[in-house]
Amino acid sequence: MVDILISGGPVMIPLAILSLAALAIILERLWVLRRANYLQTGTIQALSGLLAGRKFRGSVDYCRRHPGPFTELVVGLVENRHAPYDELKEILEDTGRLQLMGLQRGLPALATIVAGAPLLGLLGTVIGMIKIFAVVATAGSSITEQLSSGISQALITTATGLVIAIPALFTHSYLEARAVGILSDIEAQILDFLHLVRRPERVRDEEDED
């Protein structure tokens, strides 16, 4: 296997770097993009109790102690609770977009690898073909061995580029969908909190003087 990879020529070096980078990004995102990391039952219950009791200052303090996409949206909701509904919705959407960018961290780099790996493989193919034509032009006693070397380089680099790009492509789509799904779950929970925060007030909020 090592000999086969070596026969791919110098293009195999950047391909190897891309493969390691893709693997690192995929493993890191698979570990980070878990629903339990963002919507913990204890956090939801604690904030539900605080918001139901209209303890807004306490809920913001709690969120500050537990930073994350979910708590950032809760802070945005609480701090802008008196804003008109359309304005509050826009604020939450803007905050959600920013949090989604954080959830998708590393995915643009993975997309670049998906696009770049086949191109590097194609470059290796072109180099291999150039080598073949050079051998044919200077045909000698070792032409068979040199032709085999050029053909191997052309095929191996193409195959390697595709082997890197194809799994990375599907994994990228999966991770992107997982990030969007997590944010959708967060937004659904924020909607429940919205009903607590914007419910009709019969008495002055306990901490609404902020």
Image: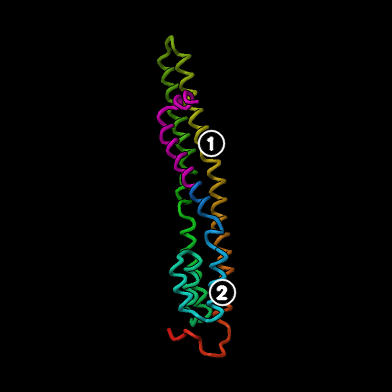
Question: Is residue 19 inside the magenta stretch?
Answer: yes
Q: Amino acid at mark 1?
A: Val
Q: Is residue 178 left or right of residue 62?
A: right
Residue that badge 1 annotates = 163
Label 1: which secondary element = helix
| Disc 1 residue crowd, few under 14, some 14–19, many 20+, Cα 10 Å | some
Distance in Å between CA atoms under marks 1 and 2: 48 Å
Q: Is residue 128 visible?
A: no
Whole-percent x, y for residue 88 in the image: 50, 77
The residue at 41%/36% (across/down) is: 14
Q: Residue furthest top?
A: 141
Residue 118 numbered mark, or none: none
- Answer yes or no: do the residues labelled 1 and 2 have beta carbons within 8 Å? no
Label 2: which secondary element = helix
Q: Nearer the viewer, residue 56 or 184?
A: 56
Whole-percent x, y for residue 206 in the image: 49, 85
Whole-percent x, y for residue 78 in the image: 49, 77
Whole-percent x, y for residue 186 in the image: 55, 65
Q: Which residues are magenta?
A: 1-26
Give the total number of marks visible in the rendering. 2
The quarter of the picture where the C terminus appears is bottom left
| Disc 2 residue crowd, few under 14, some 14–19, many 20+, Cα 10 Å | some
The residue at 49%/83% (across/down) is: 82
Q: Is residue 2 visible?
A: yes
Q: Nearer the viewer, residue 172 or 138?
A: 172
> Up-down: is 201 above or below 73?
below
From the image, state whether disc 1 or disc 2 is nearer to you: 2
Q: Earlier in the sequence, mark 1 or mark 2?
A: 2
Q: Nearer the viewer, residue 150 or 167?
A: 167
Q: Residue furthest bottom?
A: 203
Question: Is residue 44 inside the magenta stretch?
Answer: no
Residue that badge 2 annotates = 48
